[in-house]
């Protein structure tokens, strides 16, 4: 296990590896996706994005998976972002444009997955990977890692991820990040509410595992309903959002899981979720 990795426990039950993205599940219902192409510093090229999308779809289709963690096997870099070679390649512009659909599809897949996604930032989170982190529901950062979008320094603007940056960072700070291209520390990212917590290197794997298992222990049905409601209502006007959320709460009242949760609380026992 490397310092920058976010690896799950030995009780993982299934394993699927590829040249770029590892996929494992454990008996707590967590799927562990590991960016594993160190030669490119986990650049998010077409092949990497295709495999990452495929792994998310596998997690979506597996009813045993209740939460997803995205980490990296690289000791210092979570991901360096988009593939610069592809940006400057000689392929026709129309082909480059078609390939760019992978980024919005990835961000929307995470939003619409119906299962919580944790970004385990055990290394620097740069450029397009910054967008990937912001697309996740929670971000856990290792002390010493950096976040940012340095694309402008090489003549590229962070067009695609600006939508996510503007939804998560105050406008003036967002402009500073995108227009100066400076990186910020994990501590500064925490102050800006870009990450949830920053932990020492020796505690990183344990913290990620604990958070993932705690989330996976919640009702998968109510978690899915809640995440879907958040994704659907986030950009609605207030009145429309409240109406939509009221209907989702009323629907939640009809589930067996909400009754089970209340009963377990009163009886001081662990709930047994029935997913209905």
Image (cartoon, grey):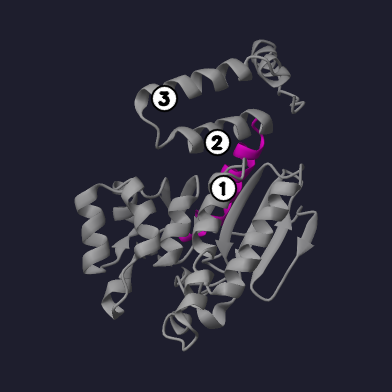
Task: Identify residue for label 2.
Answer: 227
User: In the image, residue 216 lies at what x, y percent?
Assistant: 65, 39
- Find numbered disc 1 in the image and state the secondary structure of the residue it sits on: strand
Tag nearer the camera, 2 or 3: 3
The N terminus is located in which quarter? bottom right
Residue drawn where x is 29% and y is 47% of the image: 191
Task: Identify residue for label 1.
Answer: 117
Could you tell me how far apart the alpha carbons at marks 1 and 2 are, in whole angstroms? 10 Å
- Find numbered disc 3 in the image and state the secondary structure of the residue it sits on: helix
Neighbourhood count class around disc 3 (C-alpha, 10 Å): few under 14, some 14–19, many 20 upward: few
User: In the image, residue 254 lies at what x, y percent?
Assistant: 67, 15
In the image, residue 22 above or below residue 68: below
Viewer-nearest residue: 21 or 53: 53
Position of 178 with respect to 107 (left or right) is left
Position of 15 with respect to 142 (left or right) is right
Q: Earlier in the sequence, mark 2 or mark 3?
A: 2
The label shown at residue 17 is none
Q: Residue furthest right?
A: 13
Task: Identify residue for label 3.
Answer: 240
Could you tell me how far apart the alpha carbons at marks 2 and 3 are, in whole angstroms? 17 Å
> Magenta part of the protein: which range?
201-218
Could you tell me how far apart the alpha carbons at marks 1 and 3 are, in whole angstroms? 26 Å
Tag nearer the camera, 1 or 3: 3
In the image, residue 163 above or below residue 243: below
Circles 1 and 3: CB atoms closer than 8 Å: no
User: In the image, residue 180 lies at what x, y percent?
Assistant: 21, 68
Whether residue 75 is visible: yes
Circles 2 and 3: CB atoms closer than 8 Å: no
């Amino acid at each position: 296990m490397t310092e920058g990795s976010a690896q799950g426990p030995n009780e993982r039950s299934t394993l699927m590896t590829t040249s770029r993205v590892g996929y494992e599940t454990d008996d707590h219902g967590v799927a562990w996706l590991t960016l594993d192409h160190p030669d490119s510093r986990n650049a998010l090229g077409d092949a990497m994005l295709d495999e990452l999308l495929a792994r998310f779809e596998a997690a979506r289709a597996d009813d045993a998976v209740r939460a997803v963690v995205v980490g990296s096997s690289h000791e210092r870099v979570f991901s360096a972002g988009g593939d610069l070679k592809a940006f400057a390649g000689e392929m026709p512009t129309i082909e480059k444009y078609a390939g760019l659909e992978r980024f919005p599809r990835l961000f929307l897949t995470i939003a619409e997955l119906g299962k919580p996604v944790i970004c385990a930032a055990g290394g620097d989170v740069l450029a397009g990977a910054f967008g990937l982190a912001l697309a996740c529901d929670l971000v856990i950062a290792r002390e010493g890692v950096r976040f940012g979008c340095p694309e402008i320094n090489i003549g590229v603007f962070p067009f695609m991820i600006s939508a996510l940056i503007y939804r998560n960072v105050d406008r003036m700070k967002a402009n500073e990040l995108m227009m100066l291209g400076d990186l910020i520390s994990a501590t500064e990212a925490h102050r800006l509410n870009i990450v949830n917590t920053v932990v020492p290197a020796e505690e990183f794997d344990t913290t990620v595992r604990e958070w993932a298992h705690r989330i996976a222990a919640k009702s998968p049905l109510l978690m899915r309903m809640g995440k879907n409601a958040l994704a659907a209502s986030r950009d609605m006007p207030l009145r429309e959002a409240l109406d939509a959320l009221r209907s989702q709460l009323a629907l939640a009242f009809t589930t067996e899981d909400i009754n089970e949760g209340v009963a377990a609380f009163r009886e001081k026992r662990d709930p047994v979720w029935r997913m209905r």
